[in-house]
Amino acid sequence: MVHALADAENPFSEGAAYVHGDYCPIGEARIPLTDLGFVRSDVTYDVVHVWNGRFFRLNDHLDRFEASCEKMRFSIGLSRGEIVEMLHRIVALSGLREAYVNFMASRGAFEPGSRDPLLCTNKLYAFAAPFVWITQPEEQETGIDLLVSSTPRIPMASVDQTVKNYHWADLTKSIIEANERGARLPVLLDVDGNVAEGPGFNIFMCKDGVLYTPDTGVLHGISRKTVLELADTLNVETRVVQVPEATLRGADEVFLSSTAGGVMPVRSLDQVPLGDGTPGPLSMRMRQLYWEAHDDPKHSEAVRYDCV
């Protein structure tokens, strides 16, 4: 049965974790120090959120996760159905109605005397924690201040950005730069000066009624996919193309998309206001429709809180 205890009595109230077959409170979760996911970032992961007690687009996240595992040549030993069962269970253990649910496939550790990554036993880890916001809802109402980072995004030829990964050295450096320069978030360009993505989010730009988003050097975000589908329902022309920096700087509106925050309108770029310095109408409409889509049973499924 689902925990009917007060938070103080539920050891999973701050979050629940799965560590390669075992469940535990999130604060007790551990991985081996020698796991290559830790020491070499040899890992792929995905994040799905739970809103109002329902997973949003879980199948899309699992499709991407399975594709990433295949590219990484991981075999984690669980079927898709077993992964789904595990994700429901960690949310149910926590009792959370709004949750950030992260699941990771790791290379594991080298076999004794071996340096062959394909001989490692791959591991699966996961956790459910209270919902994480890249930007808080009140910030989204007024719009956020964005900075174009001086650090380029890691090239696709080196790290495949369509495989969700923890190669965050460039992203972390950009976050620090944004903080030091008074911006809320950074967006990175690729090595050729085209718009790429930011730390945990995709970016959209609207100019003269046309919506643009980068086609390469980016994660194919599930929230990005949702925005593109919503734009189609609004008959908004979309172009998934290479986006020069000039297109970003000349945009009428800019917004970000992420599982950790939804649609996030931008009000300024490098301290220069976009439009009148407030979120644009398309940005706010997309934000509204994004959250309304969570009630659509085509995209959501109820957490099975009775599975524990």
Image (cartoon, rainbow, N blue to C red):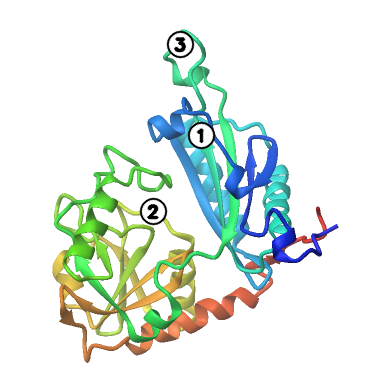
Q: Nearer the viewer, residue 246 or 85?
A: 85
Does residue 47 appear to the left or right of 252 in the view shown?
Answer: right
| Kind of residue at badge 1 | Ser
Where residue 131 sits in the image (x, y, percent)? 54, 65
Q: Is residue 284 depicted above or below 114 in this figure?
A: below
Query: Which residue is most to the front?
Result: 8
| Kind of residue at badge 3 | Ser
Dot in front, 1 or 2 = 1
Q: Mark 1 points at which residue?
A: 106
Q: How crowded is mark 3: few (under 14 residues within 10 Å), some or many (20 or more)?
A: few
**Quadrant where the image shows the N terminus:** bottom right
CA separation, marks 3 and 1? 17 Å
Dot in front, 2 or 3 = 3
Q: How crowded is mark 2: few (under 14 residues within 10 Å), some or many (20 or more)?
A: many
CA separation, marks 1 and 2? 19 Å
Sequence-wise first label, 2 or 3: 3
